[in-house]
Image (tube, rainbow, N blue to C red):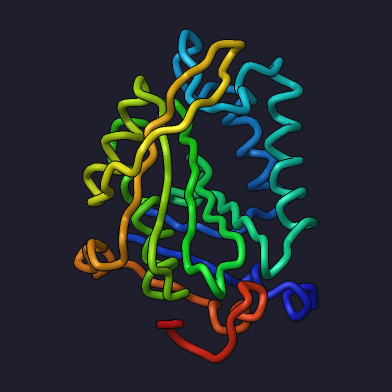
Amino acid sequence: MLIDHWPLLGLELTTPRLTLRLPGPDELAALADLAVQGVHDPSRMPFSSGWTDLPASERARSVIQHYWRRQGEWNPSDWSLSFVVLEHGQPVGSQTLAARRFRLVREVSSASWLGLRHQGRGIGTEMRAAVLHLAFDGLGAVDAVTGAFPDNDPSLAVSRKLGYLADGVERRVVRGQVVVMQRFRLPRSRWNRELAADMHITGLAPCLPMFGLTGEGPQV
């Protein structure tokens, strides 16, 4: 079976409302459709890559290619795990956890997007908390980092709610203009494990070598 060779297909995170896992073909198609329906107010751009400015058909393909590319380029020293986020079995967005030289550095980064009609209900916080649970309690991360532009209030609110600390700034070019991005860092010591009380990770043990880790259980 394919899962025997690619155990990430069996990795699943569950929260009180959500399920996060690698998408199957139908889920990936639905996620691409969701991106076409809108991710943010078109008057602003929260992504430095600008992928949501693409025409509808190209935007949908970019979502599919992103998932395929991340799987095809997977390396234990440079990995990016892009989950589809499901609520009641329907895709509502995407949540990514990534790292380089994780076995040594023990630092992860995150990125995400949520369909417009699913915003404002706390889903963004819940899905970020789910991958932080995987990072800190499943993989033994020391730090989690992320970033957001000053006008991306939802992302900034999620980071602050989850206890991230300001970690400097960096300059990006967005729609031909230089924009300052705020960086955030969440040390392991500030991770509120009470948030993960009703969260579960299944299928992690067979995946550990793919993250550059060995053994079973939390890698702390």
Residue 49 sits in quarter: top right
113 up-or-down from 46: above or below = below
Query: In the image, is 92 to the left or to the right of 60?
Result: left
Residue 81 at x, y percent in the picture = 60, 57
Residue 63 sits in quarter: top right
Query: In the image, is 152 to the left or to the right of 10?
Result: left
Q: Which of 209 and 107 is in front in this view?
A: 107
Instruction: Locate the N terminus and report the quarter of the image it occupies.
Output: bottom right
Examine the rendering and report whether any part of residue 124 can be seen. no
**Residue for point 65% across, 34% down:** 32
**Residue for point 73% across, 75% down:** 3
Q: Residue furthest bottom?
A: 215
11 up-or-down from 18: above or below = below
Instruction: Locate the C terminus and report the quarter of the image it occupies.
Output: bottom left
Residue 132 at x, y percent in the picture = 38, 60
Examine the rendering and report whether any part of residue 4 can be seen. yes
**Residue for point 73% across, 61% down:** 74
